[in-house]
Amino acid sequence: MPDPSAVLNAVVAGVLLGGFYAAVALGIAIAFGMLDIPNLSHPAFVVMGAFATWVLNNTFGIDPVLAGLIMTGPFFILGVLLYRLYHTCFESRGEAPLQGLAFFFGILFITEVVLVLTAGADYRSVQADYIGVSVNLGSVTLPLRMVVPFVVSIGMLLALQQFLSRSFTGRAILAVSQDKLALQLMGVSPTRIKALAFGISIATAAVAGSLLIIIQPVEPSIGRDFIGRAFAAVVLGGMGSFWGMLIASIILGITESIVSDMWNPSWAPAIAFGFLLPTLAFRSGGLLGRKL
Amino acid sequence: MSSITISHLGAGYGKVRVIQDLSMEVRSGETVALLGTNGNGKSTLIKCVMGLLTPAEGSIKAEIDGVTHELAGMRTEDIVSLGIALVPEGRRLFPRLTVEENLTIGAFRRVARKVLPRNIDFCFEAFPRLKERRTQLAGSMSGGEQQMLALGRALMSEPRILLIDEPSVGLAPLLVKRTIEKIAELKQEKQLTVLMAEQNFHQALRIADRGYVIVHGEIAFAGNSAAELNENDLIKKLYMGL
Ligand SMILES: Nc1ncnc2c1ncn2[C@@H]1O[C@H](COP(=O)(O)OP(=O)(O)O)[C@@H](O)[C@H]1O
Ligand SMILES: [Mg+2]
């Protein structure tokens, strides 16, 4: 019988970890779930965001979270440009599905190589007052290096959720994958909306990257470690549903944390998926997807 | 004041010419019916007006509040911004958005955003059904309700000119009758200029001031009144096989 307080600690650690997964999955949920853009390279942008945070933190002593927020600007522009390229080369020619995947796969490798060439293959980390500090709540230990990313991630999720459901641009983003022609008839350019939304999706990678490097040291190919989990969270949560994605992220986080604590860390992904795949079998739209 | 004047329009898909040398007009405040059986080019003509298809030749002029715009070559988004809205064939709602979200997105146009609450109220008053179902996904509604929503969504953009492509398609006869009457009512209240493509000439002529009969992409007959169209031999031939 495992010690109850150890289980409780594992659950809390899992929730916090899930919060971080949600920050990574958010951009994927926008690209795949709302825009039909198969951006496989998203985790590479997260790592890029982590390195950008490292540079700002190391050279200017800027707080990592603030650094992530500052980088949303350049990352947004990068995302808009990347979408324009993708649109011109693939989407507008109707060759999107397979060629598009290959394109983003290429971007994934290029990004990694560029990072190795410019920053080296070493592990990098950042400094902040809260890293290394823990708060104790009864028998539960809350490491701030996990709490801060959790809070920032939820904040980002809430902000985007509000933006999507309350602003005209946000609603157009929700509609763009459903009927492009109808959207044009509402006076909206689908290409502009998608460019903007993809820019936002890449901008979230800057924030997720800053959270990643707060949690742990980062090297250029580390994105591969959580690529599967982030995609799983999006699919299992219900394509395009933020709350479903968050719940799935947290379930993945908890399962992973408990399994690694109690049994073997390498079993974690298999057990997490084994736990969540039946969800998909019974609810093909994911946990909370809007389904007709 | 708002009107459309189409002159010598030619259009098609690739090498296939669907419309040739077509001229017609919709004057301010009129309800004009574009009548024709399936495949004669009604939707193609409407796509040209909305900029969804670029005409091969001819011009489409829209006059709105004293300013004349050449629509041929303009982008759809810009045409909508002028105050021209389309209820497309097959409704084209956003199936996984709610009724209310569909209506709200209709008000994307700048001038429409300011009057959004008033227009939502207007739609809910005109279609109480939509109010009852405001949180329901559009794709889960019946054909009749979807047609109401499509009409409401188009009105949300504060149009001056409303194009409607086959509102009767897929509806039961009683619903067709009601939808057509509703269009007349909305047109009156919103002071619209309306161009309506229909196969169902009998229903269309109940509310149309005038109409054109389109056959193989050409205007085969222009009727200056509903009565004139009702009496027309061509229509009798096309629709009743006489
Ligand atoms: N997207 C398209 N590509 C090629 N041909 C088309 C397309 N849409 C319509 N057509 C052809 O154009 C002709 C007119 O069609 P349409 O304008 O839809 O007629 P209507 O609306 O009067 O039924 C038909 O012969 C149809 O097959
Ligand atoms: Mg048609």
Image (spheres, coloured by chain):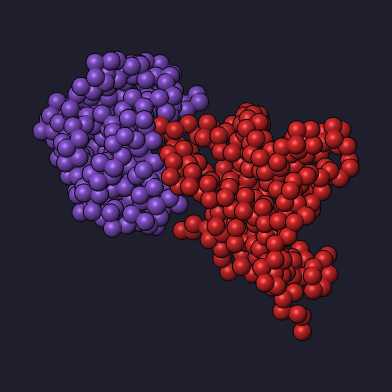
Chain colours: A red, B purple
**B199 up-or-down from A80: above or below:** below
State how many labels appear: 0
- Give the residue drawn at x 31%, y 28%: B83
**B53 up-or-down from A18: above or below:** above
Which quadrant is the C terminus of chain B positioned in?
A: top left
Residue A135 position, x and y percent, is 70, 62
Residue A139 position, x and y percent, is 70, 73
- Give the residue drawn at x 20%, y 22%: B1
- Give the residue drawn at x 59%, y 31%: A92
Q: Foreground: A177 or B173? A: A177
Most extreme residue toward the left, as rendered? B227
**A176 up-or-down from B12: above or below:** below
Q: Work out whether residue A132 can be spotted.
A: yes
* B47 sits left or right of A90 in the view: left
Q: Work out whether residue B40 can be spotted.
A: no
Residue A81 position, x and y percent, is 64, 29
Residue A72 position, x and y percent, is 63, 36
**A285 up-or-down from B39: above or below:** below
Q: Looking at the rendering, which quadrant does residue B210 occupy?
A: top left
- Give the residue drawn at x 84%, y 43%: A124
Most extreme residue toward the bottom, as rendered? A1
Q: Foreground: A154 or B227? A: A154
Q: Looking at the rendering, which quadrant does residue A236 occupy?
A: bottom right
Q: Foreground: A14 or B17? A: A14
